[in-house]
Amino acid sequence: MSADFETHAYDVLVVGAGGAGLRAAIAASAAGAKVGVVTKSLLGKAHTVMAEGGIAAALANVDERDNWKVHFSDTMRGGAYLNQWRMAELHAKEAPERVRELEAWGAVFDRTGDGKILQRNFGGHRYPRLAHVGDRTGLEMIRTLQDHGIHRGMSVHMETTLVALLTDGGRVSGAVGYDRERGRMRVFNARAVVLATGGLGRIFQITSNSWEYTGDGPALAYRAGAELMDLEFVQFHPTGMIWPPSVRGILVTEGVRGEGGVLRNREGRRFMFDDIPPLYRQQTADTPEEGWRYVTGDRNARRPPELLTRDHVARCIMREVREGRGSPHGGVFLDIAWIKEKIPHAAEHIRRKLPSMYQQFKELADLDITAEPMEIGPTTHYSMGGVRVDADTQMSSVAGLFAAGECAAGLHGANRLGGNSLSDLLVFGQRAGHYAAEFAAQNGPARSDAAQIEAAARGATEVFERPATTAANPFQIQQEMQEMMQAKVGIVRTGPEMDQALAALAELGGRAAHIAVTGNREYNPGWHTALDLRNCLLVAEAITRAARERRESRGAHFREDFPEKSPEFGGFNLVLRQGADGGMELRRQPLPPMPPPLQAIIEEMK
């Protein structure tokens, strides 16, 4: 092995330091494993901090009717019944314990009058279910996990990007990466690896995701032989900032609507009352007054239509924009200031309940949300798809390779309910870490293949050896890919446009193969972008192929040429893997049959 490689050895290597990664590291360390954590950015700078609304868990602190069965049913319905039922069951049952555990480790939640954890309403949830800390829940969660995890014992490698996973006879054996500051190559030998790399929003032009979210986890797993699933389901959050242009895409928490915010078009009309799906009609208010009573605590009232599922709200917003009723900058208005008509000291109430949102709009848009409506529009937010994993252990189809959080598939089906992401991180981060440590203990060290390591390093650095005269520009290719994916594989899709997208991705991939980077490996953003681009193009192709194959509209996947659900496509997930010829293979994976007791819960809740 070259002397240039800095080498580390762990029982369990966790890739990602967000909620799922930290919870996995804590669980693996608690089981006695030597744990290393690799993070592309800095410890504490994870996208978990952007999850502002709360953690979904059936604690029943605000409404005693809530329980795990209702949460399970809501999650399955929100996912259009393409969820892996076992994951939805485990999630609903274990989320309360994980939240109480977080509280025991020092998380400070908002409280009810009698001292219990306060819970708020959120889209798609039947009862107030989201445990929260104002609108900074994710930040409090990361702070708590980070403090607890560091004291449990783990080595952290910050600003380190992985370029390949290593395998040995069908099992994972570690990873190769580099430190982003100096460009030095690093080798991580490991008996088990947990991928917790988050999402893929940077594939699209308008996104709430930060620069790290380039689909690294699914791409690394795919190249190592693992299967991917449900990648056609990309969630476009209905409310992101759209003005000024410099902040376009930044998330506006669903908590604004949970606290009484309403959506209006340029005419001032609450357009969400125009289109309430039959499935939700019995739960949704017929009048603004009834919806307001629900928000303020009258459980006999029905919830406002602004709290319908995210895919539906996003499409309603786009309908208003397309039909000429949008706001001046191509969105609609989100108004929380109107509650001054209903409660005294409304401005103080808003600042207390939504401190981050108040500060965000004041600093970035010079707008006071206690006095004026916000201008918002849909933004690429979350991927329901990712690495296909075992429901109980979170292990992928490659032995010793686990995945948790947003980069894993199965829990959310065709659409994620707000708040389920944070409880997902806790429940399945814990499971992935526990079973990864168990796998590491039961299996000896894997062989470290010098040829694989050298090939990975060579593949990462070859861009420096190409002549710059005829080279493609990585930043230009990235921008063209993002604009194309937003336009042709975005909120509304058609078969012909996705065929065009696949052709465009092939052309962009051809140009990306000729990228040359000048300078050296220290502080080189061109190099970082060139490596990110490989993962982006791979995952973009997987999204497009799966979306083209699913000839129906379901959950977050909307086909204008197939606008209805189809019984033909309701009984399987779409799974992708690398074929023997290097091409992308796609197959239909039948959903596992649901046990009668769980099926009875679904029928009862309907």
Image (cartoon, rainbow, N blue to C red):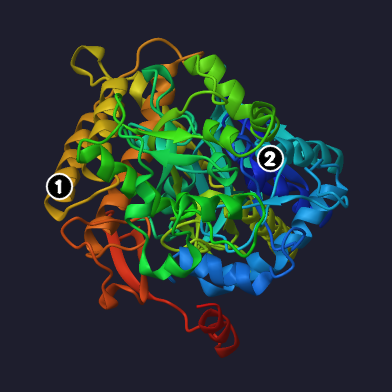
Going by the numbered disc 2, the residue's amino acid type is: Thr
**Going by the image, does 436 lie left or right of 235?**
right
Eye-nearest disc, 1 or 2 = 2
Give the distance between the C-alpha atoms of the residues marked 1 and 2, in whole angstroms.
39 Å
Judging by the rendered image, the residue that carries numbered circle 1 is: 497
Label placed on residue 197: none
Going by the numbered disc 1, the residue's amino acid type is: Glu
Quadrant (top left/top right/bottom left/bottom right) for the N terminus: top right
Q: Where 385 falls versus 490 (above or below)? A: below
- Residue 490, horizontal then vertical, whole percent: 28, 44
Callout 1 secondary element: helix
Counting residues from the N terminus, which is met first, the one under dot 1 or under dot 2? 2
Which of 570/211 is in front?
570
Q: Quadrant of residue 329?
A: top left
Q: Quadrant of residue 318?
A: top left
Q: Residue at x 27, y 38 (%)?
A: 486
Residue 447 appearing in the image: no
Residue 301 appearing in the image: yes
Q: Residue at x 54, y 47 (%)?
A: 449
- Residue 419, horizontal then vertical, whole percent: 59, 51
Judging by the rendered image, the residue that carries numbered circle 2 is: 137
- Residue 530, horizontal then vertical, whole percent: 36, 27
Callout 2 secondary element: helix
